[in-house]
Amino acid sequence: MNDTVLSVGGASPYDVVVGSDLAERLPGMLGVGVQRVAVVFSDALGDLVRPVLDSLAAAYDVMVLPIPDGERAKGAAVAVACWDALGEAGFTRSDAIVTFGGGATTDLGGFVAATWLRGVRVVHVPTTLLAMVDAAVGGKTGVNTRSGKNLVGSFHEPAGVLCDLATLATLPRPELVAGLGEVVKCGFIADPRILELVETTDPETLTADSPVLRELVERAIRVKIDVVVADLKETGGFGGHPGREVLNYGHTMAHAIERAENYGIRHGEAVALGCVYVAELASRAGTLAPQIVARHHAAFARVGLPTTYDGASFDELHAAMKVDKKTRGSQLRFVVLSDLAVPTVLAGPSEVDLRSAFDVLVGGRA
Ligand SMILES: NC(=O)c1ccc[n+]([C@@H]2O[C@H](COP(=O)([O-])OP(=O)(O)OC[C@H]3O[C@@H](n4cnc5c(N)ncnc54)[C@H](O)[C@@H]3O)[C@@H](O)[C@H]2O)c1
Ligand SMILES: O=C(O)C(=O)C[C@@H](O)[C@H](O)[C@H](O)COP(=O)(O)O
Ligand SMILES: [Zn+2]
């Protein structure tokens, strides 16, 4: 099947290519003048990185920057180790970084690219569903700190993104399902056709070679592109739309749960819980109709994601939510829906509503 090229406009335009066997496109995306390329990837991926290294070796001096797997990559110490390696190699502003892996790798590698010499070119080659539809696109990069998730970072747009669907063939099923969390999120905030596809497709058939999965990937990427082109740096929306904050739907609670679980829960799983939570919260605040709240529970559960949570206490999560980037002063702010694909911001919900929505998350829907 042909590759799909989705263009991201703005001051630094780039392409997101969706297809198969895309490694040969890398040199074209890196552009002219690059001599050295540092490839940031998790050791756990083993030989999967080989086609990327081979494609680069023909044209550049290639150095490898192996990093810890998963969320362990997203720490300041890993960034420091990468900066040291780049320094020792004499990496200059005409050199470039390629990231290969899931969202943790693209976030860390993107952050290193954003900060080394105040910014060098980066191309992302996401290898999880979640990184293809979300993390690799839009330029958000960052690391976690002891206080919470993604608290240090930068906006640094890639020079290109290669979503090679063939790489999903080796992705463990729970990781693919976690990626569907962000896809379903996009269905609720902007593209209800995504929900229809999810609701009418046997989730077991959503495999690397599935045309429906490909359509879901392309639709979710389009949602993200439309948002980041309008509000790259999350400075705000207009006409009542929350701007880029809309992509944070469900993330206030999701990030609190991830931190409380010491990152032992996948991001996409936490996003499913966070979206269910915020739908329940919106219903208590009077913005969302019960049938759309019910649709949240059903859609995430249908693809195999959790919709109930029995872990940290409300008080612990409430404290963690306060460091969310949408918070202003002591006021929590949530992206909520008033209808399908009609997002708005709910500022300062009552503690009664916050607790009562949490009770549903713990106890399940009656
Ligand atoms: N910057 C953004 O806009 C943005 C958006 C969404 C999520 N994120 C971040 O992304 C991270 C989550 O990303 P993720 O879900 O991709 O998890 P991940 O990066 O932790 O990867 C999950 C696991 O999949 C393995 N893996 C990756 N590709 C594989 C493949 N093709 N075959 C076999 N195994 C493979 C990895 O080694 C890892 O163990 C979180 O840190 C989240 O905060 C960032
Ligand atoms: O791209 C965005 O903007 C998002 O909010 C996408 C989220 O899915 C993603 O998890 C992001 O990393 C969260 O950003 P943060 O600003 O809350 O750290
Ligand atoms: Zn997310």
Image (cartoon, helix red, strand yellow):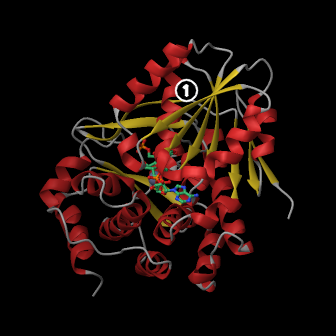
Q: Is residue 71 left or right of residue 43?
A: left
Vertical position of residue 3 compared to residue 90: above or below:
below
* Quadrant in which the C terminus appears: bottom left
Say which amino acid is labelled 1: Ala
Vertical position of residue 134 compared to residue 288: above or below:
above
Q: Is residue 338 left or right of residue 192?
A: left
Q: Position of residue 44 (x, y in %)?
A: 47, 51
| Count of marks placed on residues | 1
* Quadrant in which the N terminus appears: bottom right
Vertical position of residue 190 compared to residue 124: above or below:
below
State the residue in front, 235 or 119: 119
Q: Disc 1 designates what residue?
A: 113
Cβ of disc 1 within 8 Å of ligand 1? no
Residue 356 visible in the snapshot? yes
Q: Position of residue 263 (x, y in %)?
A: 30, 53
Q: Who's the residue at 17% across and 64% down the image?
A: 352
